[in-house]
Amino acid sequence: MNVALIAHDNKKDDIVNLAIAYQNILKNVNLFATGTTGLRIHEATGLPVHRFQSGPYGGDQQIGAMIANDEMDLVIFLRDPLTAQPHDPDITALLRICDVHNVPVATNLATAEALVRAMEQGLVDFKPRGLETGR
Ligand SMILES: O=C(CO)COP(=O)(O)O
């Protein structure tokens, strides 16, 4: 199971606290993250995290590429809805590609917790691989 963790600056404490609270679940999956988010999570939990570029430097697009390749099972993306982001097109594209490939994506803490708990119970397997593109 491959899981992406992403958070904007005002949400980084939230995603770090989420990772701490659920590290017993997250230690059983492969974690991927944008650069700064991944560093913060690794420093706080010691969990191995594959870090891509920082979001404004292309990290959202790198995670989007994994989704397009059917290589990502779940995305937690704690967006800051109150602050303009210079890479807003990348953020929109990431959320769009989740929808294209039917990848579960949480954009707030409440949904993130629900998805992590669902994953623990083996309930996160929504992707009809290939079906969405008719392949
Ligand atoms: O900007 C981001 C997502 O859009 C997150 O990037 P960082 O984790 O590098 O701060």
Image (cartoon, rainbow, N blue to C red):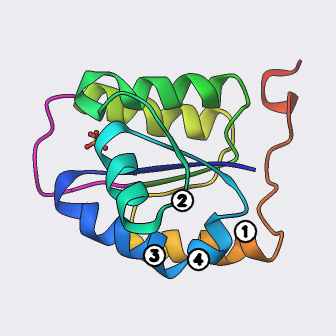
Residue indicated by mark 2: 47
Q: Position of residue 27 (x, y in %)?
A: 65, 64
Marked residue nearer the N-terminal end (3 or 4): 3
Q: Main secondary structure of the magenta part?
A: loop
Q: Which residue is mark 1?
A: 119
Which one is earlier in the sequence, the residue at label 3 or at label 1?
3
Identify the residue position indicated by label 4 in the image: 114
Within-10-Å neighbours for mark 1: few <14, some 14–19, many 20+: some
Mark in front: 3 vs 1 = 3
Q: Amino acid at mark 1?
A: Met
Q: CA distance from mark 3 to mark 1?
A: 16 Å
Membership of 51 in magenta stretch: no
Question: Horizontally, is 127 left or right of 15 in the view?
Answer: right
Query: Do callouts 3 and 1 mark residues in contact (Cβ within 8 Å)?
Result: no
Task: Name the residue rendered at 18%, 53% in the picture.
Answer: 9
**Between discs 4 and 1, the one toward the N terminus:** 4
Q: Would you place residue 37 above or below residue 111 in this image?
A: above
Kind of residue indicated by mark 2 = Leu
- Residue 93 point in image, percent of width and height: 42, 28
Of mark 1 and mark 2, the one earlier in the sequence is 2
Under mark 3, the amino acid is Ile
Residue linked to disc 3: 20
Toward the top, the furthest residue is 135
Mark 3 vs 4: CB contact within 8 A? no
Q: Measuring 25% from the left and 62% from the top, which residue is drawn there?
A: 11
